[in-house]
Image: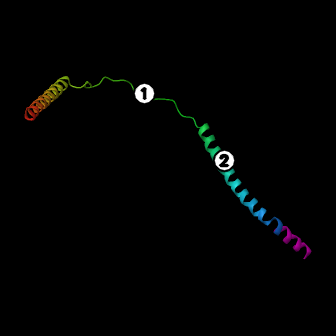
Amino acid sequence: MKNMKHELENLAKYGGANITMNQEMGWARKAVAETRDRYARAKVDLDQSLSSKFVVNKAIKAEKKSYPVRWLIVVFSTLSALFLSVLVLIGIESYAQFKKSKA
């Protein structure tokens, strides 16, 4: 009984500190496990070797030229210039009529 009484006194005296220490030890174990995982991943990344070998096929002449067709570029640029000039002329005429109607 004396032994049990002594154990109960120790439990009453150091019980809260023991629980706190057990919780802190659990957190420390988790931190150590996470650190080990990060270390293992970093070690795998370090040990992996990436190949720097590129396979290049033999060059062959193209079947069809890869430049755009010149006549198509000329036609589109001419049409766009014509369209833009018509828009500018319409804008100038509208402004002139607006100015006449105001005066």
In the rendered structure, find residue 35 and report the number of the disc placed on it.
Answer: 2
Residue 5 placement, left or right of 89:
right
Location of the N terminus (image quadrant): bottom right
Q: Residue furthest bottom?
A: 1
Residue 103 placement, left or right of 63:
left
The residue mark sitting in front, 2 or 1, is 2
Percent position (x, y) of residue 99?
A: 11, 32
Q: Residue furthest right?
A: 2
Which element carries disc 1, helix, strand or loop?
Answer: loop
Q: Could you tell me the amino acid type at mark 1?
A: Val
Q: Quadrant of the rendered structure where residue 26 is?
A: bottom right
Q: Could you tell me the amino acid type at mark 2?
A: Thr
In the rendered structure, find residue 56 and report the number of the disc placed on it.
Answer: 1
Location of the C terminus (image quadrant): top left
Residue 23 placement, left or right of 56:
right
Q: Which residues are magenta?
A: 1-11
Q: Residue at x 50, y 29 (%)?
A: 53
For the residues bearing labels 2 and 1, Cβ distance under 8 angstroms:
no
Q: Is residue 8 magenta?
A: yes
Q: Residues within 10 Å of mark 1 (few under 14, many from 20)?
A: few
Q: In the rendered view, tell whether residue 53 sits above or below residue 37.
A: above
Q: In the rendered view, tell whether residue 5 sits above or below residue 31.
A: below
